Amino acid sequence: MGGASSSTSGDSEVCGGCGVGGLFAPDLIDTKEVAINHVTVDFPQLGDVTRRVYDVSRELRNDRDVAIAAVRCDGLALNVFSASMRNDFEVVLTAVSNNGEALLYASMALRKDREIIVEAIETSRFAALRLAHPMMVKDESLVAWANECRTPNPHANRDMVKSDAVHGIAFK
């Protein structure tokens, strides 16, 4: 498997020999280590990780490690993974930590999860609330948290918010 090695600007190798743009055609990447390397190369443009996930076999698009590696680089890559990955708490939490708008691609069950929403708010503010389950938008404490994230240091009260969320304490 694998295409010929190619260089971009300078002598750096692209994705360990995957070739320019990293596209395997018509073969799909079917080795986990190669897939993780392939989707985690440092890309200059948004969306490149998502395009690279299409080079990975369907079986590996159901692999949690591959999904986490990809969404850690670009949270919006969540949209090309299987429904089971979009319903996996750790995968979705990693995606929204990178880009809160990845909440759009999470399962409806996880769009109701308070911890996921708090994390999404930290990276995307009110956009995350717009994408959350409708019942979560009515939660005044989440709206307050989105307002607080507008401050220069949104992490100042993060531990309190997560702690209160776990214990079911209402915010002021």
Image: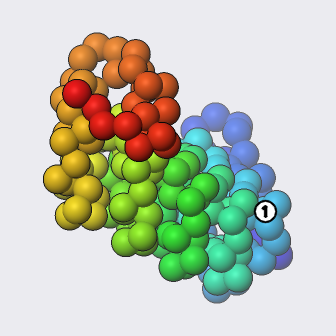
Q: Which of 98 and 43 is in front in this view?
A: 98
Residue depicted at x 19% and y 53%: 137
Q: Position of residue 84 (x, y in %)?
A: 57, 77
Q: Nearer the viewer, residue 143 or 46?
A: 143
Displayed quadrant of residue 76: bottom left
**Residue type for callout 1:** Val
Q: Where is residue 73 in the image (x, y as percent from the top left)?
A: 55, 46
Against 85, is 36 above or below? above
Q: Can residue 82 be seen in this view?
A: yes
Residue 117 placement, left or right of 1: left
Q: Where is residue 78 in the image (x, y as percent from the top left)?
A: 48, 64
Against 27, is 138 above or below? above
Q: Pointer 1: residues within 10 angstroms few (<14), some, or many (20+)?
A: some
Q: Quadrant of the N terminus?
A: bottom right
Q: Is residue 145 visible?
A: no
Residue depicted at x 38% and y 67%: 105
Residue 38 placement, left or right of 75: right
Residue depicted at x 37% and y 37%: 169
Displayed quadrant of residue 65: bottom right
The residue singled out by tag 1 in the image is 34
Q: In which quarter of the image is the C terminus?
A: top left
